[in-house]
């Protein structure tokens, strides 16, 4: 799970393997495989860095650095 911050300031944890797409319009919207949308404060690069760090932590993709 990776932490994200909703627009109201509440921290929320999501499963990064369930993110289908990240959209910037102007807020960052995470489109989940379930069809839900989560609007967050983090920039797309921050989300991607957290996803990579999470995958490295669990050993899913050892070639991601």
Image (cartoon, helix red, strand yellow):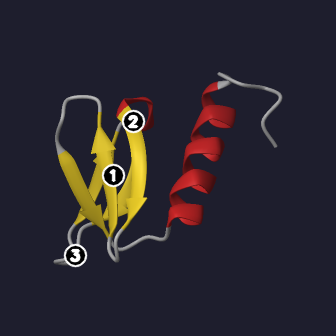
Nearest to the observer: residue 58 or residue 26: 26
| Residue beneath disc 1 | 30
**Residue 65: x, y in percent?**
82, 43
The answer to whether residue 53 shows anywhere in this view is yes
Q: Where residue 7 is drawn, which disc sits there?
A: 3
Seen in the picture, residue 32 relative to 29 is either above or below; the reply is above
Q: Earlier in the sequence, mark 1 or mark 2?
A: 2
Q: Position of residue 62 (x, y in %)?
A: 79, 26
The answer to whether one can see residue 1 in this image is: no
Secondary structure found at label 1: strand
Q: Residues within 10 Å of mark 3 (few under 14, many from 20)?
A: some
Q: Which residue is mark 2?
A: 20
Q: Give the foreground label among 3 and 1.
A: 1
Q: Are marks 1 and 2 in contact (CB under 8 Å)?
A: no
Among the 4 quarters of the image, the one containing residue 7: bottom left
Instruction: Describe residue 29's horizontal placement relative to residue 61 as left or right.
Output: left
Which type of secondary structure does the marked residue at label 2 adopt?
strand
Residue at 43% of width from left, 70% of height from top?
Answer: 42
Q: Earlier in the sequence, mark 3 or mark 2?
A: 3
**Residue 12 % position (x, y):** 26, 56
**Element carrying mark 3:** loop
Report if the CB atoms under discs 3 and 2 are less than 8 Å apart.
no
Mark 1 vs mark 2, CA separation in Å: 8 Å
Between marks 3 and 2, how big is the CA–CA gap?
20 Å
């Amino acid at each position: 799970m990776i932490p994200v911050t909703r627009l109201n300031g509440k921290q929320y944890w999501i499963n990064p393997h369930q993110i289908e797409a990240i959209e910037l319009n102007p807020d960052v919207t995470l489109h989940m495989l379930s069809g839900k949308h989560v609007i967050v404060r983090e920039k797309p690069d921050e989300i991607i860095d957290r996803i990579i760090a999470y995958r490295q932590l669990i050993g899913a993709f050892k070639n991601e650095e």
